[in-house]
Amino acid sequence: MIKPYSLIAIIYNPKSTGASKRLARQLQRKLTKRLPEQKIKLIPTKHAGHAEQLAGEITRRYKRPLIVSSSGDGGYNEVVNGILHARKKGHEPVAGLLPAGNANDHFHELHTQDSVEAIAEQYEQYIDVLSFTATTKGQPVQRYAHSYIGIGLTPEAGYKLNQSRLKLLSEAWIVAKVLLFLSSVKVLINGEVRHYDSLVFSNVTKMSKILKLSQTAKPHDGKFEITAFRRRNKPQLIRSLLRTATVGLVGDRQETEYSFTTINPTLIQLDGEVMRIDAHCEVHVTIVPAALRCIV
């Protein structure tokens, strides 16, 4: 007999422009019908970062909760960080994602069945996560990413998308503008200054729905893939992106850790979240094997 979760918490953003609220309520109704004895709570967020706070509080309070994020990759990133920063001995939190965003890279990588069925039957799996350390505004920061970490084109486009009203401006136009005005990112690696149009660390095969980063990436192999586009002219970069979206990349290599030093203040994207890190800061990316237990 399957033991019920101590709580199923469904976190959603009531102000989301997507279907976060509708899908969260729909999941609650279906789960209540399927699991009438299960304690289920629908929890709205109130501000940016609130999902992470809520996930942390639930992780500390309940011994074996399932925390479902009705969101895209960015909202799920908050929940994952809340769980991983708050986890403690004897507690076994489980993460779940109800895809209500744009790309939903993590969901499409792992999930093969109906969400209600997966939760009811407790189809769970441990996956690796990426860990990232740097400084921002002079303060050390440590964050986790469930799918990818990137500098260059990825966060520049993500930052513009986050700042825009997507119902008025198409994603394609925004990305095209970023490409047009993109400047390469300068970083220091092993004492050498290198220029990158894009540098991505990932444990998924696809990013932003169509970009095929790797043909061999797995979220539980104890490694991450590095996909690097060194500085090139715009026609060459566009050809590389087209190849990534059609044929796909083999991937530069696999690693368990990687370090570089920023030269200028730099935008970095962790899943769907974009942040600015300081100039002259040491950035360290590592893989944390089997760190997150999640519904698949």
Image (cartoon, rainbow, N blue to C red):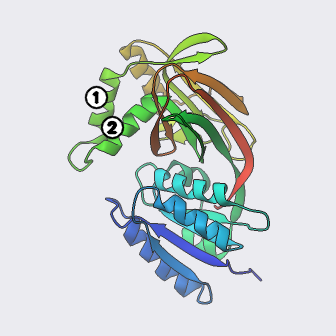
The residue shown at (66%, 38%) is: 217
Q: Quadrant of residue 284?
A: top right
The label shown at residue 11 is: none
Q: Amino acid at mark 1?
A: Lys
Q: Residue furthest left?
A: 168
Image quadrant containing the N terminus: bottom right
The residue shown at (28%, 28%) is: 177
Q: Residue furthest top?
A: 192
Circle 2 packing at 10 Å, graded few (<14), some (14-19), many (20+), is: some
Circle 1 packing at 10 Å, graded few (<14), some (14-19), many (20+), is: few
The residue shown at (26%, 35%) is: 173
Q: Quadrant of residue 191?
A: top right
Residue 254 position, x and y percent, is 70, 30
Relative placement, left or right, of 286 versus 69 is right
Q: Residue furthest front?
A: 138
Residue 280 sits above or below residue 168 on the image:
above
Q: Is residue 239 visible?
A: yes
For label 1, the residue is: 177
Residue 290 position, x and y percent, is 75, 51
Residue 148 sits above or below residue 77 on the image:
above
For label 2, the residue is: 160
